[in-house]
Image (cartoon, grey):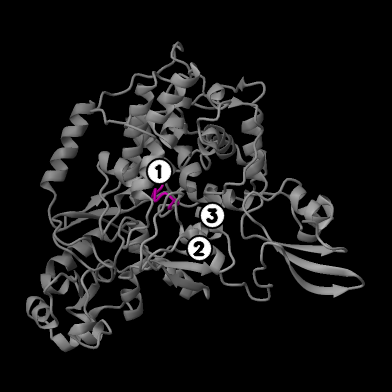
Amino acid sequence: MRLAWLLSLLVLLLVGCAAEVHTSPQAYLRLSPQASPDAAVSVPPPALYPESPYAPVLPVAAPVNLTGTAEDTELAEASDAVAPEDEEVLDSETLADNAALQASDLAPPEEEGETVFLNAREFDFPVVDNEKVRYFVGYFSGPLHKHVHTWLERSTRYLPMMREIFAEQGLPRDLVYLAMIESGFNNKALSRARASGPWQFMEGTGRAYGLSNDWWRDERRDPEKATLAAARHLNDLYRMFDGDWYLALAAYNAGAGKIKRAIERYGTRDFWELCHGSYLKQETKHYVPKMLAGMMIAKHPERYGFTGLVYQEPLAYELIDLPSATDVDVIAELAESDYETIKKLNPELKRWSTPPGVQSYPLRLPVGSGVAFAERYAELPENQRANFVHHKIKKGDTPAALAKRYGVRADDLLRFNKLRDSRSLRVGQNLLIPLNPEASKMSLADLRESLRDDAPAAKARKGGGKSYTVRSGDSLYKIARRFNVSEQQLRGWNDLGGKSALKPGQTLVVAAAAAPGKVAAAPAKGKTVTAQDGVKTVVYLVQSGDTLWEIGRRFAVEEQQIRDWNKLPRNPVLRPGQRLTLQVKSTPRG
């Protein structure tokens, strides 16, 4: 049955024509279990330990080398962590998700305590309850409640599709909630280590599972392609660790080689025992309990205080195959839709157009628009499908040569790209070639912004912050001292990984914009704002590693007072750069 399905899929891929319309499977229109509590679970519970009799039979697939040769995560970060020059400017919603997902100031208990297996009839994945899991349940339903509320509402757009793919691959359907912990079901989520998409693939791992990433598209952000790749990756890890899901999940986060070495070092295959040592990073130690806590909340949101959820409709679309590169605004017009809708249905597209040089590019359209689009598209001359062409300057390029190559006037090319003359061209520069500029509905500013190499500078401009161009010999430490900020703040503002290397000419955000009506960021020791009756109001900028106890001791105030002044919960999560207002009666302690 599975072989027949694969052969059918291969035939469809080979036979696809320029405007043949496909409709998403009916299963993709089903409501998720949250909206339809009667949805059946057909996959038997998989094994937590190898000796369990409930391990599912997994389909055989070509294995991918997962073991690596050294510290998997560290090597990946060292090679992939530097922000690529073609990076997009992320929207505010994605930036908020990234910050919440990457919070590093977590403090779960060192010991997990008594571990109890929960009712297997509620989950098709082995779920346990212990002190660490309960900590993250409280963290998600407390400090992170607002974000998790959004993620739960967003989840139902993708859950039916994800569950179906996981079931087809022989995986527990409840394992799809891993995407909430990885990305909040945000296709554009991006980690400091440059992992991208709903399943947070590093570029190398994504490539190993068939996900392309170039100047035009990032298939790690394609919800269906990335989900299939994640299912294959998880399957491989599950087999590698002999049917132990907790070890497989830890390896998904840290790398299979890292977990194998941890097992050899400590002589145990028990995930919780491995976490007692210092070899695994905190992020990996937190990963499994976070996943279990997220799954428990997602299955029973009201039980944990998530009420009034307005779930999104499941992903539905019609699929067409484009024979040549086509601008998104042209597609939107022919489909009687809009630019944003087309981009949302196709989050893998990084630019204003589908990739050039790709025949039969699959593109999603709103339901009901496929047939009319195909008819209109067939009537549109090929030279009117793309209004702009991207060109990266190479050695020897001149305005005259480019004008001749693309059939445009050299003066138009220079004026469109705000260039004075041929001497303004530099190797590696991105140019927009205006083929039919009057036909485009996109603003020139948006088009030029899509070409930008300096995403941090764009963030600074939009947010009112300050940017700095890296010079030879600069380091994060030197730049942090120069602008009176911390290295952690620089990493956060610029999405830099722990081992990112700075390059001369790179643009960094070095000062965040102050919110209207707020006091500007104060130096680490606090800034006195007002003084009245011997009491000074101090705005303190939280530093990496700070706790309420340490701040209270430093300024001779009580923890509860700091909570009251700043309306903080009982166990707040402090983040570097956060501002705290303090009422100080005496000189702060050193």
Disc 1 secondary structure class? loop
Check residue 197 for magenta coloring. yes
- Circle 3: is it few (<14), some (14-19), or many (20+) Cα within 10 Å? some
Residue drawn where x is 13% and y is 79% of the image: 398
Q: Which residue in the protein does label 2 denote?
A: 478
Q: Amino acid at mark 1?
A: Trp
Instruction: Examine the rendering and report whether any part of residue 410 can be seen.
Output: yes
Magenta residues?
190-200
Check residue 545 for magenta coloring. no
Q: Could you tell me if the residues under marks 2 and 3 are in contact, i.e. CB atoms within 8 Å?
A: no
Mark before the other along the chain sequence, 3 or 1:
3
Disc 3 secondary structure class? helix
Q: Is residue 536 left or right of residue 464?
A: right
User: In the image, which is nearer the foreground, mark 2 or mark 3?
Assistant: 2
| Residue 240 - label | none
| Residue 99 - label | 3
Q: Position of residue 41 (x, y in %)?
A: 46, 28
Q: Which residue in the protein does label 1 denote?
A: 199
Between marks 3 and 1, how big is the CA–CA gap? 16 Å
Residue drawn where x is 27% and y is 45% of the image: 211
Instruction: Examine the rendering and report whether any part of residue 45 can be seen.
Output: no
Q: Position of residue 548 (x, y in %)?
A: 74, 50
Residue drawn where x is 28% and y is 61% of the image: 369
Q: Identify the image quadrant of residue 487.
A: bottom right
Q: Nearer the viewer, residue 573 or 235?
A: 573
Q: Could you tell me if the residues under marks 3 and 1 are in contact, i.e. CB atoms within 8 Å?
A: no
